[in-house]
Amino acid sequence: MKACVLYSGGKDSSLMATILKRLNLEVELVTANFGVYKSWIPAAKSAKALGFPHRVLKLDKSVLDRAVEKIIDDGFPNNGIDFVHRQVLEAAAGEYDIIADGTRRDDRTPKLTSNEIRSFEDRNSVEYINLAGFGYKTINRLASQLFILKKERSDIHNNSDYEIEIRYFIDKIKGKGESSRFFPEHYQTRVIGWK
Amino acid sequence: MKACVLYSGGKDSSLMATILKRLNLEVELVTANFGVYKSWIPAAKSAKALGFPHRVLKLDKSVLDRAVEKIIDDGFPNNGIDFVHRQVLEAAAGEYDIIADGTRRDDRTPKLTSNEIRSFEDRNSVEYINLAGFGYKTINRLASQLFILKKERSDIHNNSDYEIEIRYFIDKIKGKGESSRFFPEHYQTRVIGWK
């Protein structure tokens, strides 16, 4: 059975993929995209560096529209990103029997509750797996033992998080730089190969 | 760094050990015991069959006394078993930097809350890992792909759960068969080798 790991090129989703691969599952790394900006390219590069097959899961642009609407209404991105993640999971469930992501024990957004996970699994007859058993200290240590990591300021060219396409679209409809009102600058760790 | 996996010989703790081993950690399987009944023997056999080092972590008999008191007062075992598990984790934290167990996403008892996990990690400067990212369907499938499993009625000779020594002690102080008032009969799946 093939497992889909929702993939950003970061250490969490790379570790999730590594665990499933080493448990002998066939793993495919999947990055969602709305067709607005090719934000999946950094993830595809990380996947290639690790030797995993990678594909883009095309999502309906209406999901992006609604997420952006939520974020502008709320004044902060969490609910919009949560909404996108749930839509991505549902889309992946149409194509895979096992769906995993890199959500950690201490992650806040996006994160499914136990009830949402049960409902997601039952409605779609799929299995959902994440990194909820691991805290950030463990993930940092394991990732730095397994992967060559690059720490850098996150930008439109080096990041495949949902955030990138959302920001691109907000800047496009609201004016250049407008997305900075909702998303703070941040540093990220990208996986660029095996150690 | 050495990781301690609290080990019963069942599929959950065996899978946890396998994941950590395959992430290149040095894994030691550990079964707690109060010195009242040698309930660790089935776990030691499973560990040997999988080629993992195994040891017994001796716990103070006062922990067993207090657990049994709770169980008799409550009329059901959950709180007593939770108490034992927490004491075992604290004892393991005195000897290891990484402590793992086979708690799944859908387990109820014993299970730490997120706040308890954070407190446990911070107070002891350890990392705690479990299988909270995996549901029972996934664990059953992975375990049956990885391990030779034996399904059987759980009894004093084939099980290393906390329950066994607790029951032995209740029967000893309250009279033969008395522990059946608190613990229902159940079937278990024991790991007896690699596939």
Image (cartoon, coloured by chain):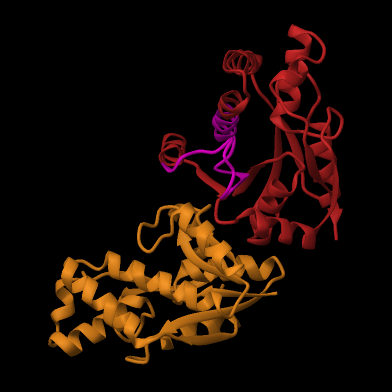
Chain colours: A red, B orange
Residue A27 lies left or right of residue B54; in this view the side is: right
| Occupied quadrant, residue A170 | top right
Q: Is residue A126 above or below residue A167?
A: below
Q: Is residue A15 visible?
A: yes
Left or right position of B128 against B163: right
Left or right: A159 with respect to A24?
A: right
Please state the extent of the stretch shown in magenta in the rendering.
A85-114
In the image, taking residue A192 as reference, residue A68 lies left or right, namely left
Q: Would you say residue B192 is visible in this rendering?
A: no
Residue A97 falls inside the magenta stretch:
yes
Indicate whether B25 appears above or below B164.
above
The residue positioned 17% from the left and 88% from the top of the image is: B173
- Is A179 magenta? The answer is no
Q: Position of residue A4 (x, y in %)?
A: 64, 42
Vertical order, A44 against B37 (above or below) = above
Q: Residue B5, located in which quarter of the rendered image?
A: bottom right
Relative depth, front residue between A23 and A106: A106
Badge count:
0
Q: Position of residue B57 (x, y in %)?
A: 48, 85
Tell me the quarter of the image containing the C terminus of chain B: bottom right
Task: Where is residue A71? Give x, y as percent.
Answer: 61, 18
User: Could you tell me which residue is drawn at 85 percent across and 61 percent down?
Assistant: A195
Report x, y in % for residue A109. Answer: 59, 36
Along the viewing direction, whichever of A183 and B161 lies nearer the viewer: A183
Quadrant where the N terminus of chain B lies? bottom right
Q: Residue at coordinates 60% horizontally, 69% vertically from top-left?
A: B18
Q: Looking at the image, which is closer to me, A176 or B163?
A: A176
